Structure formats: C-alpha cells, structure tokens
Image (cartoon, coloured by chain):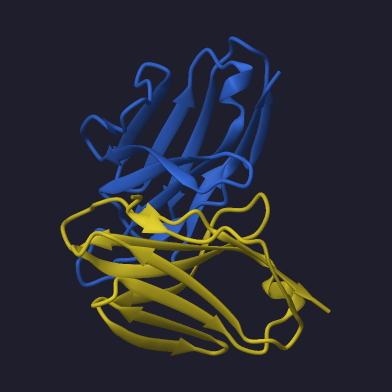
Chain colours: A blue, B yellow
Amino acid sequence: GAVVSQHPSWVICKSGTSVKIECRSLDFQATTMFWYRQFPKQSLMLMATSNEGSKATYEQGVEKDKFLINHASLTLSTLTVTSAHPEDSSFYICSARDLDPRGRTEAFFGQGTRLTVV
Amino acid sequence: QKEVEQDPGPLSVPEGAIVSLNCTYSNSAFQYFMWYRQYSRKGPELLMYTYSSGNKEDGRFTAQVDKSSKYISLFIRDSQPSDSATYLCAMRRNSGNTPLVFGKGTRLSVIA
C-alpha cells in the first residue's frame, strides 16, 4: 500500500511548550490530509481536514489556535500543538488520500505520534 | 443514533477459528467501505477496501457489504495470534475528499 510517514513517533514535552508533528505522503500527492486524535481504547476522532494551500477545516470543539495546521505542499502537512498542557496528551494520527482520481482512493494512515505533556 | 455502530468487544477466540466482525450504519449515502487493523500504539493499517455492495476476498480475509441492510462484515479465516488487534470499520460518501467515519473498533484476541 501507499506510504504515509509521520514524525516523530513519540514525544515528551513540558507544559507550555509547542510541539510540531509532520505528516508526509511518500509515494503520492495529496491535496487533502486528515488529522485525528485517539484516546486509549477509543476510536479515532477527526480533528481537522488539512487542505493544500488553504486554511484547514476544524471539527466542532477543536481549537484552531491551539492546533495549528499547515499544508505547505502536496506531500506535507504539519500539526503544531501550541502551549501544550497535560490534557493534550494523546495519540495523534494523520491520513492522506491520493490526489489522482485514477489512483487509489482509499485513505492511508501514518504511524501515529504519541504526545505526552508533563 | 450514531452514524456507524460497532461492538467494541473484546472478542476472544481460539487459534484457527473463523472470526466475524460487523458494523451497521445509518447513512445511505456511504459508498466506500473499509476495514482497518490497528495494533496497540500504531496507526491503522488498511486491510480491505470495498466500493458499494458485494464481497471481496484477500487471503484469509473476506469483506462483505450489504447496502440494503446497511451492514458490513469482515471475516477472518484460520485466525492466528498475530491477528490480535483492534479492527475498525470506516466508510465515506462518494463526494470529493470527505473524511472517513469510523466505528469504535472491536478488540480481538486470538488465543494460541
């Protein structure tokens, strides 16, 4: 299957600092990437839809000023958790879908990033 | 009623058993149906991908979609301990880059 690379796979940061998570599609281009958050033993919760060259669309209840999303190119989207607090500790996962309509239309996921804020 | 319902389990079966995992949904606009496997602390891995109704087989895995009943299934034959994971159903409408809607996931344990 297609490869979506997410980095870092885990990070520990101090309260009040910011953390940036990268999501790259390695063998296809994606105009749209999705960011999810997952709590232990829970399903994936969509946070936002990231569109290349434009502002992200955030789901209700997700603070756009806290979770900054930048989709600078067709292969890279970043999620920055600003002024992180312990309650932001979670598993963050990105996914991407092939731009080419003749290509695969299923979504592929990154490996996930486990964020721990201390 | 949630858009996608999935029994979270846990489901425990002996090695070699046939496993049946199911999801129901309420939105008749869903056209694409997927099953993902997720190991602990890893991202979901796409297992099966089906468009509209019908069956699809890949090795030990068979996916079925019954749009008239709004019901999808994943069957795992000759289950192995390595199949122990959480299985998530997901689906989306047939319009642009709409996000997937996920079930809660079913935790499966295959006991050797």
Q: Nearer the viewer, residue A109 or A25?
A: A109
- Image-based side of B13 in relation to B25, left or right: right
Q: Please give the count of numbered marks on the rendered protein.
A: 0
The answer to whether residue A1 shows anywhere in this view is no
Image x and y of residue A39, in percent: 58, 39
Most distant residue in the right direction: B112
Residue A77 vertical placement versus B81 (above, below): above
Image x and y of residue B63, in percent: 43, 81
Q: Quadrant of residue A49?
A: top left
Most distant residue in the top direction: A16
Residue A17 vertical placement versus A29 (above, below): above
Residue at 38% x, 26% y is A62
Most distant residue in the left direction: B95
Residue A46 vertical placement versus A19 (above, below): below
Image x and y of residue A59, in percent: 31, 33
Residue at 29% x, 75% y is B69
The quarter in which the C terminus of chain A is drawn is top right
Residue at 44% x, 56% y is B103
Q: Nearer the viewer, residue A79 or A40?
A: A40
The answer to whether residue B67 shows anywhere in this view is yes
Image x and y of residue B90, in percent: 39, 61
Residue at 50% x, 65% y is B36
- Image-based side of A25 in relation to B11, left or right: left
